[in-house]
Amino acid sequence: LDRTDAGTLLLTVPASGVTGSTLMGGAFSAAWFSAIAPATLAAGSVLSATFFLPFWLAGGLMLKQTILDPAKTTSLTIGEYAWELTQSLPGGVKTSEERGSTEELSGADVSVSVVTNGVPIYVCRLVAGVTAWGVGDGLPQEELEWISSQINDQLASYSRVREAAGVSQMLPPPPPDVG
């Protein structure tokens, strides 16, 4: 976490890296695809092979959540007028890049993204209207709460500056809370 001389928030969340969960997910994905691929090829026709489409999608989602998501580095910049969120894999390969006006941002919150074996996995969500982006995949809840508070404090400081300048009277009302 850093701030520029102009007060812009600069947040970089490094990849969570290889964990036991990552290894187990990778092993399960390999086993999953080693069963689905031959079954799909043995289906005999394109129509029969379409039966396996949901299994390919489920395997792909598992692979994304256990291998790709923990490998992503997230960079968030929130300035007085604009924000940018970039997620990238090792080697600088960008997986997503979003940006917009700071006034569009409703704030950040922490919510459960998935429950695995009764254990909740939390994510910090950056919210703009009805759209939300995950920040800090794989981090503990306490760290995500801290990231959320830093984002919300930054947005509140810009709101106070606008109110002091009388600009808030000219802005549309904020969007409804989606959380």
Image (cartoon, helix red, strand yellow):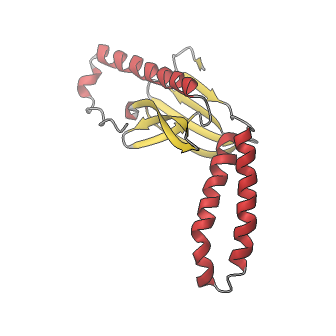
For image coordinates 44% across by 30% down, the residue present is: 108
Of residues 58 and 4, the one nearer the viewer is 58
- The single residue placed furthest to the front in the displayed view is 118
In percent of width and height, residue 49 lies at 63, 79
Query: Would you identify the image quadrant in which residue 42 lies?
Result: bottom right
Q: Quadrant of the N terminus?
A: top right
Q: In this view, does 160 lie above or below 43?
A: above
Q: In this view, does 73 lie above or below 80?
A: below
Q: Is residue 14 left or right of residue 164?
A: right
Of residues 61 and 78, the one nearer the viewer is 61
Query: Would you identify the image quadrant in which residue 86 lies?
Result: top right
For image coordinates 63% across by 30% down, the residue present is: 13
In percent of width and height, residue 53 lies at 59, 70
In percent of width and height, residue 139 lies at 61, 31
Query: Would you identify the image quadrant in which residue 121 lies?
Result: top right
- The single residue placed furthest to the left in the displayed view is 169
Q: Is residue 155 left or right of residue 93?
A: left
Q: In this view, does 93 lie to the left or right of 134?
A: right
Of residues 39 and 81, the one nearer the viewer is 39
Q: Quadrant of the C terminus?
A: top left
Of residues 98 and 33, the one nearer the viewer is 33
Disc tally is 0
In percent of width and height, residue 157 lies at 41, 17
For image coordinates 53% across by 24% down, the residue present is: 147
